[in-house]
Image: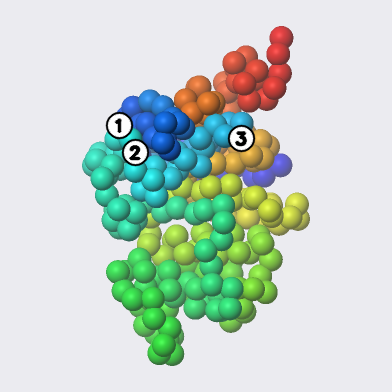
């Protein structure tokens, strides 16, 4: 059982920091997301669950700009960002991790963090010159490593990290851009049982510092313990949104997602 979050629980009156309105996306003649209306409150921890193929990763792709909506819109802090490129969404406070790692395995942990900080500042991704430890990008990267508990691994090659520590490093790269909203796509996928709890603590600590988290995750015990609310996708549609207790008790969810029937 993971520890309860110390972050304040968002209220129903809190203004949404992230929202989708009638969001629809598909490939060719296939509709994968249809009319998704979802609001995420400022400071909330919202988990997105659903069966395989429900559209969970596709939803994060459209929100982050990796895929462009067929119709509908995405709003961040009240601003319509539907037509913005991913990099511009990042600069407006939206961070995203992926199921597949995009780290540089033959560089050190600190070098990866420095590159993340450079990218967030709109600079080049050059490692031609040796970094100065006092430069802004390096310091930002080292600070982010400290936030996820990897400061002591700064000089190690990424290739030598465990899968759980690589996930922490991916979160550190997001923190370099100081995002208001983090989109986490299956953060514990492939992580050993022993490393799940430390990784979850990092995610909860990041949330407790005031950031909004939207997480796609398949580990139901983590979803139930960590979430303020849970959104359930099924066949590309939003089935329901509610507290963990409400969602787990919903007969439609039990039938569609948990495979239970009366």
Q: In which quarter of the image is residue 40?
A: top left
Residue lying at 41% horizontally and 54% vertically, measured from the top left: 95
Q: Are marks 2 and 1 in contact (CB under 8 Å)?
A: yes
Q: Mark 1 points at which residue?
A: 72
Whole-percent x, y for residue 26 in the image: 42, 35
- Whole-Å distance between the Cαs marked 1 and 3? 24 Å
Q: Name the residue under label 3.
A: 52
Which one is in front, 140 or 11? 140
As drawn, the residue found furthest toward the left would be: 79
Q: Left or right: 141 with respect to 168? A: left
Residue 210 visible within the image: no
Taking 44 as reference, is 90 above or below it?
Answer: below
Whole-percent x, y for residue 173 in the image: 47, 64
As drawn, the residue found furthest toward the front would be: 29
Which one is in front, 123 or 117? 123
As drawn, the residue found furthest toward the top would be: 262
Q: How crowded is mark 1: few (under 14 residues within 10 Å), some or many (20 or more)?
A: some
Q: Quadrant of residue 90?
A: bottom left
Residue lying at 61% horizontally and 78% vertically, measured from the top left: 157
Secondary structure state at the residue bearing disc 1? strand
């Amino acid at each position: 059982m993971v520890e309860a979050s110390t972050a304040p629980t968002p209220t129903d009156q809190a203004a949404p920091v992230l929202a989708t309105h009638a969001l629809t996306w598909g490939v060719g003649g296939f509709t994968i997301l249809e009319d998704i209306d979802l609001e995420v409150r400022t400071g909330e921890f919202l988990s997105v669950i659903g069966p395989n193929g429900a559209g969970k990763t596709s939803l994060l792709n459209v929100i982050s700009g990796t895929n462009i909506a067929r119709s509908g819109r995405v709003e961040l802090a009240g601003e319509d960002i539907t037509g913005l490129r991913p990099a511009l969404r990042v600069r407006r406070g939206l961070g995203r991790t992926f199921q597949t790692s995009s780290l540089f395995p033959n560089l050190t942990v600190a070098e990866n963090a420095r590159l993340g900080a450079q990218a967030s500042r709109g600079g080049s991704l050059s490692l031609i010159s040796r970094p100065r430890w006092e430069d802004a990008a390096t310091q930002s990267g080292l600070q982010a490593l400290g936030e996820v508990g990897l400061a002591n691994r700064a000089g190690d090659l990424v290739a030598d990290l465990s899968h759980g520590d690589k996930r922490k490093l991916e979160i550190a790269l997001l923190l370099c851009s100081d995002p208001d909203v983090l989109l986490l796509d299956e953060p514990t996928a492939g992580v050993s049982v022993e490393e799940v709890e430390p990784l979850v603590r990092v995610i909860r600590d990041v949330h407790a510092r005031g950031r909004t988290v939207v997480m796609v995750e398949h580990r139901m015990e983590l979803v139930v313990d960590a979430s303020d609310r849970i959104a359930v996708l099924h066949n590309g549609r939003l089935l329901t949104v509610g507290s963990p207790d409400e969602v787990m008790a919903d007969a439609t969810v039990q039938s569609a997602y948990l495979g239970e029937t009366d």
